[in-house]
Amino acid sequence: VEKQRVAIIGAGKVGSVLARALVHQRYRLTGIASRTLTSAEKLAKEFGVVGVTEAADITKSATMIVIATPDRCIREVVEKVAQAGGFRPGQYLLHTSGATSVDVLCSASQQGVFIGSIHPLQSFASTEGDKTSLVESYFAVGGDIQAVSVAEDMVKNFGGHSFTISDQDRPLYHAAACIASNYLVSLMHWSTQIYARFGLSSQQATAALMPLVEGTIRNIKHVGPTSALTGPISRGDDLTIAAHLGNMVNQHDKTLYAQLALYTLGVAVEQGTIDGQQTKRIETILNQTIQEGLL
Ligand SMILES: NC(=O)c1ccc[n+]([C@@H]2O[C@H](COP(=O)([O-])OP(=O)(O)OC[C@H]3O[C@@H](n4cnc5c(N)ncnc54)[C@H](OP(=O)(O)O)[C@@H]3O)[C@@H](O)[C@H]2O)c1
């Protein structure tokens, strides 16, 4: 089958990984467009294609266009290409945002373009990202059936898995992804900051905590997020929880700890490892801490 000729708009973290994965799968690139010529040319150079700031210059000759700009720019980028005559009927236009509706691409669909989205449920922290991060990753796809179909083909070529998502479900679907990825990063940031008080560098703290985190993730993978819970809440050790809170200096930290602990208490109850009395004792300590934060 003839592979799509793809124009990529947005030479950032996602645009870079997708470009590498597409070229590896023998898709042809018509070029890379970005806000700055520097970013566009840097990525374009890897594949010997043109780097531009005017997206319409590379979309005309493409059969598929992928937009990987920040969410807030997608609509205006599409409107600009539409005004510049960069779309042709029968092309496919996909954005890579999780939360954004496919509807922001409507100025292209008015010109006969099939619109959709392809959101990798993966975290890309650098523009140097390798295509192998897409293997076995899940992708949420949506939009016109024609666009969904080419997006699914692309995911299959990447060695990933796809599932469809409706526009109305997107914000919460994306919120869940942020909870799992971004807030895990914040928890690790918080945890390593606490170790800095004992003189550990950020690197040392991360190294020390990594086996714990990796072990936890393995447990989640094998037994699921309810049975994977260990620690004082799962054991009903109320005095340990009180000691944690009693040694934190900052009220903001105490409140955040107590809120997360309350959620965790629900997990422990679901796990069935603590009785009603233990639950009540821990709940009282946590609610008291949250109340103090409100004063
Ligand atoms: N990072 C992730 O883990 C991840 C995961 C899944 C989905 N996504 C989605 O993928 C999209 C891109 O995210 P990202 O993390 O790759 O962002 P990013 O690294 O900040 O890259 C965005 C790129 O878009 C370019 N850009 C900004 N405004 C533009 C405009 N008006 N016209 C053309 N290009 C423009 C920037 O160009 P310059 O470099 O030239 O300034 C930048 O290179 C977002 O919709 C995001 O929700 C991200």
Image: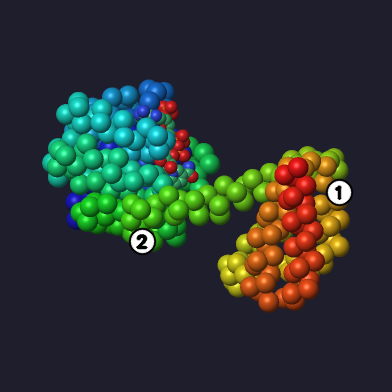
Task: Quadrant for residue 164, please give it.
Answer: bottom left
Depth check, front residue: 53 or 101? 101
Q: Is residue 112 visible?
A: yes
The quadrant in which the N terminus is found is: bottom left
Q: Is residue 32 visible?
A: no
The quadrant in which the C terminus is found is: top right
Q: In this rendering, is residue 18 above or below 210?
A: above
* 62 displayed left or right of 66: left
Q: Which residue is mark 2?
A: 163
Q: Would you say the beta carbon of the disc 1 residue lies within 8 angstroms of ligand 1? A: no
Q: Residues within 10 Å of mark 2 (few under 14, many from 20)?
A: few
Element class at badge 2:
strand
Q: Position of residue 5 (x, y in %)?
A: 23, 42
Q: Position of residue 192 (x, y in %)?
A: 74, 45
* 68 displayed left or right of 219: left
Question: Mark 2: which amino acid?
Answer: Phe
Q: Position of residue 293 (x, y in %)?
A: 74, 45
Callout in the foreground (1, 2)? 1
Task: Quadrant for residue 220, please give it.
Answer: bottom right
Say which residue appears at 30% left-offset and 46% top-offset.
Answer: 102
Q: Which residue is mark 1?
A: 247
The earlier-in-sequence mark between 1 and 2 is: 2
Q: How is the image coloured?
A: rainbow
Question: Mark 1: which amino acid?
Answer: Asn
Q: Position of residue 159 (x, y in %)?
A: 39, 59
Q: Residues within 10 Å of mark 1 (few under 14, many from 20)?
A: few
Q: Would you say the beta carbon of the disc 2 residue lies within 8 angstroms of ligand 1? A: no
Say which residue appears at 23% left-offset and 40% top-offset.
Answer: 106
Image quarter for ligand 1: top left
Say which residue appears at 68% left-offset and 55% top-offset.
Answer: 260
How many numbered badges does the structure rendering display?
2
